[in-house]
Amino acid sequence: MEHSNKYIFIYSVILVVVVAISLTVVAVQLKPAQEDNIRIEKMQNILASVNVSTADVAKKQVIDLYNKYITNSQAVNTKGEVVETDPAKVFAIDMASEIKKPLENQMLPIFTASLDDGETAYVFPLRGKGLWGPVWGYLSLKTDYNTIVGATFDHKGETPGLGAEINQEWFSSEFRGKTINDNNGNFTSIKIIKGGAKPDDPHGVDAISGGTITSHGVEKMIYDNLESYQEYFKKVKNQ
């Protein structure tokens, strides 16, 4: 019996080691593909915020579209100072990490898009909290740094059919043409209104029915993130 127990113990240890090594090897092999998928998805989201569709587009085509439309990128700080101009480094900035830093240490990306109609748009990443977890997205503005060109949102675990609807085109399309400043140029951001915004409300969009908390999370996310760019907006407008 003693020999049998020793055999079982050794066998179990060897089995655990073999499984652990196998899982590590698989994880290492899959990591480049996973990182590539994350990079492509980020490109798709940036393009979606300027209303460039990548539905049913192969990875190589997504990269081509990104390089076609996104013509410049930089990162600024909350003082409005440019702190990074290397496109690769700007693209690699992780907003989930940045928003955890003190405001004065945050790097805030800006992606410049050249659109088919000859217009220029500026894309800003967003990161915040929903009901059950993080929400994020991208929002683009015209050269007046006021009028929204487009937006896209996503989430980690919002309720299907309710808060999860933030990633639907019907919701993001409401933001097009809305403005983030009042008539005096003061920052007001966007209001997501339960029961529906008035048709003539330049800053309001309809909240998601049954997704009030997620809607408020998106509203706060937009305000908090765009507020960090206000000093930069002031500087470029005064140039």
Image (tube, rainbow, N blue to C red):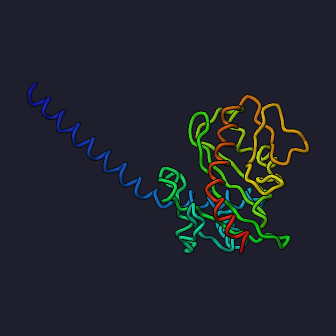
The N terminus lies in which quarter of the figure?
top left
Q: Is residue 191 left or right of residue 45?
A: right
What residue is shown at x 82% (from left), y 31% (from top)? Answer: 195
Q: Number of marks in the image?
A: 0
Q: Position of residue 54 (x, y in %)?
A: 73, 59
Looking at this view, name the residue that lies furthest to the top: 1
The image quadrant that residue 219 belongs to is top right
Q: Quadrant of residue 7?
A: top left
Give the quarter of the figure containing the C terminus.
bottom right
The image position of residue 155, as x and y in percent, is: 62, 43
Q: Residue at x 81, y 56 (%)?
A: 184
Residue 28 on image: x %, y %: 40, 57
Extreme residue in the right direction:
200
Q: Toward the viewer: 92 or 54?
A: 92
Q: Residue furthest front?
A: 184
Q: Is residue 207 above or below residue 72?
A: above
- The residue under the point 68% across, 62% down is 58
